[in-house]
Image (spheres, helix red, strand yellow):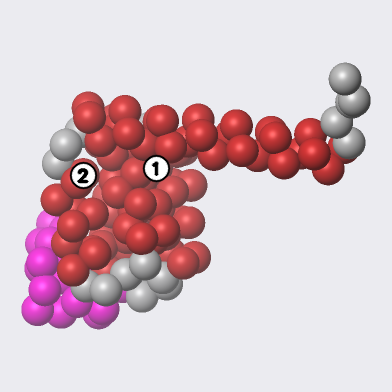
Amino acid sequence: ERELSAVDRQRLAARRANEAARERYRNCLKNFPEAEPARAVVVKRGVSPEMAEAFALGYALLLAGDLIGAERMLQRALKIQPDSPAAHYHLGVLRAAQNRPADAREQYALARQLDPSGPYGQLAERALSR
């Protein structure tokens, strides 16, 4: 049997990591089914499936208390779609949970600006008025 090249080993490791991430995503959605309607909201707004999955996983991880994982996924969602009020709002929630109120307010303000009369803009407005 031939040994794998360094590139093939990297590809195999990446594939395994992706499979593990997908499994974690599925488990998070089982444990936190409220993340699925949130994903559906962003899908209705015409976002890519990759952004919707990154957002939903970030939200589920936030609900699970995994702030590091949530931050990573919400940042990924924003990298894919920087003008997502949903991702900015939930990143604000995350920043508040991290006891970073100035950063939370910044994210809420962005969500309100991007979605002034929509659901995330209204949530952000309430968060800013506290």
**Mark 2 burial class by Cα count in 10 Å: few <14, some 14-19, many 20+:** many
The residue where tag 2 is placed is 35
| Position in image of residue 99 (x %, y %) | 35, 43
| Position in image of residue 116 (x %, y %) | 15, 79
* In the displayed structure image, the side of residue 20 where residue 39 appears, left or right: left
**Mark 1 burial class by Cα count in 10 Å: few <14, some 14-19, many 20+:** many
Q: Residue at x 32, y 58 (%)?
A: 52
Q: Is residue 84 above or below residue 95?
A: below
| Position in image of residue 36 (x %, y %) | 19, 46
- Asked where in the image residue 129 lies, by quadrant, the reply is bottom left
Q: Which residue is drawn at 37% across and 67% down?
A: 48
| Position in image of residue 113 (x %, y %) | 25, 79
Q: In this view, does 92 lie above or below 84?
A: above
Q: Which residue is drawn at 21% across and 44% down?
A: 35
Q: Residue furthest top?
A: 1
Mark 1 residue element: helix
Mark earlier in primary sequence (2, 1): 2
Tell me the number on the disc at residue 10: none
The residue where tag 1 is placed is 70
Camera-side residue: 126 or 88? 88
Magenta segment range? 108-130
**Which corner quadrant holds the C terminus?**
bottom left
Q: Does the magenta stretch include residue 114?
A: yes
Q: Is residue 63 magenta?
A: no
Q: Which amino acid does label 1 sit on?
A: Ala
